[in-house]
Amino acid sequence: MSPVYPLLKPLIFRIDPEIAHGMTLKALPLWPSAAPAPDPILETHLAGMALPNPIGLAAGFDKDAEVPDAMLRLGFGFVECGSVTPRPQAGNPKPRLFRLVEDEAVINRMGFNNQGLAAAVARLKARAGRPGVVGFNLGANKDSEDRTADYVTGIAASAAHARYITINISSPNTPGLRALQDGAALADLIGRVQAARPAGTGPLFVKLAPDQEEADYDIIARAAIDGRVDGLIVANTTIRRPPLRSAHAGEAGGLSGAPLAPLAMAALKAFRSATGGQLPLVAAGGIASAADALARIEAGATAVQLYSALVYHGPGLAAWIARDLATLLRQRGFAHVGEAIGSRA
């Protein structure tokens, strides 16, 4: 953890969380780099992409692709911007973002607030030629009559300018969006998106919810494999409410952070089983330490992503996790992080 962040944290936590996040985005380009020298034991290949380490920034933090290079300098092995919708939208009414401090968690009902596809793609184009893996997460407009058409529009416009694309059909804050995870709807979505995907562009991922029924895992896995998806991100926020202590526990929206970890781990294991190891899996949800990251990797994840933990541990978290992960791997006798993938699946 950065030695500066514990001093700033009490002040930051006095500010409305959404305002604080906006201030953070403005300040990050000035934040000193925290990235250690790349450690060969952490070098990762995800769907053909070479990563210096398997610690990624989850979508939601940098919705409009404003600070991907700043986050890479802080030690993330890859950064995912978004979610971005074809047309700009304001999102849901405020307040819509809540810190659950006692639970080290966050509830959000942002509703895909973003500046729209054109603005974000312009920023991706402007960073062309810079190093680092930057992905792009696509959403659908709330008032769209054809949500799948929004993803088609998104991939056609952005795939040539991002290292990979993620189709986010698992946010709980756009009514009806999660219905696209259902069998026939998912197969149709993947087919239409693949048809619109420009030739020679990077991998395609689908981001899924942790709130699946038991039968859903095999259905989703089959649609993804048959549709030639390059990987799955497991998982988004949850609409479930495990026991929570915060006064904000009853707020509507998606829950992330520490309480999500058991649900996300269970979903990861279920998708690992359902896919039979045929697809790379990226684990997200409740990851805040090297031990958390290694547990997901050993359960079958090729890489991990985090976001909510930054609220509680600061912008130096990725570098801290990467250093500790390298140490843990050596302590457990692994010569390379790839050896750990699925070792306890």
Image: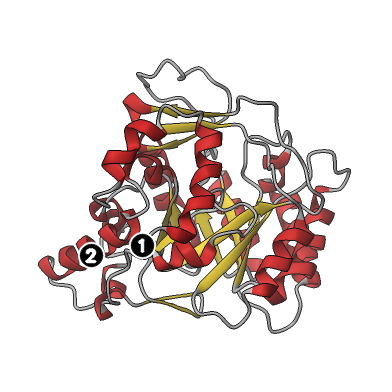
Report whether residue 204 is seen. yes
Identify the mark at residue 32; answer none if there is no mark.
Answer: 1
The mark lying in front, picked from 2 and 1, is: 1
| 292 displayed left or right of 168 | left
Q: How crowded is mark 1: few (under 14 residues within 10 Å), some or many (20 or more)?
A: few
Instruction: Work out which residue is located at the far front of the displayed protein and give it.
Output: 30
Q: Residue 59: image x %, image y %?
A: 55, 53
Secondary structure beneath disc 2?
helix
- Side of 343 relative to 240 (left or right): left
Residue at 72% across, 66% down: 121
216 or 249, which is in the foreground? 249
Label located before the other in sequence (2 or 1) = 1
Which disc is residue 323 wearing? 2
User: Considering the numbered disc 1 on the image, is that residue within a helix, a strand or a loop?
Assistant: loop
Q: Is residue 266 visible?
A: no
Left or right, 293 with reference to 173: left
Please, what is the three-letter code of the amino acid marked with disc 1? Pro
CA separation, marks 2 and 1?
Answer: 17 Å
Residue 182 percent coordinates (x, y): 68, 45
Residue at the location (48% across, 60% down)?
29
Q: Compare residues 209 and 79 and report the one nearer the observer.
A: 79
Question: How many neighbours does mark 2 have within 10 angstroms: few (below 14), some (14-19), or many (20 or more)?
Answer: some
Q: Point out residue 271 in the picture as x, y percentages from the top left corner.
A: 47, 54
From the viewer's side, name the closer residue of 177 and 127.
127
| Scheme by which the image is coloured | secondary structure
Amino acid type of the residue tagged 2 in the rendering: Arg
Residue drawn where x is 28% and y is 76% of the image: 37
Q: Is residue 1 left or right of residue 162?
A: left
| For the residues bearing labels 2 and 1, Cβ distance under 8 angstroms | no
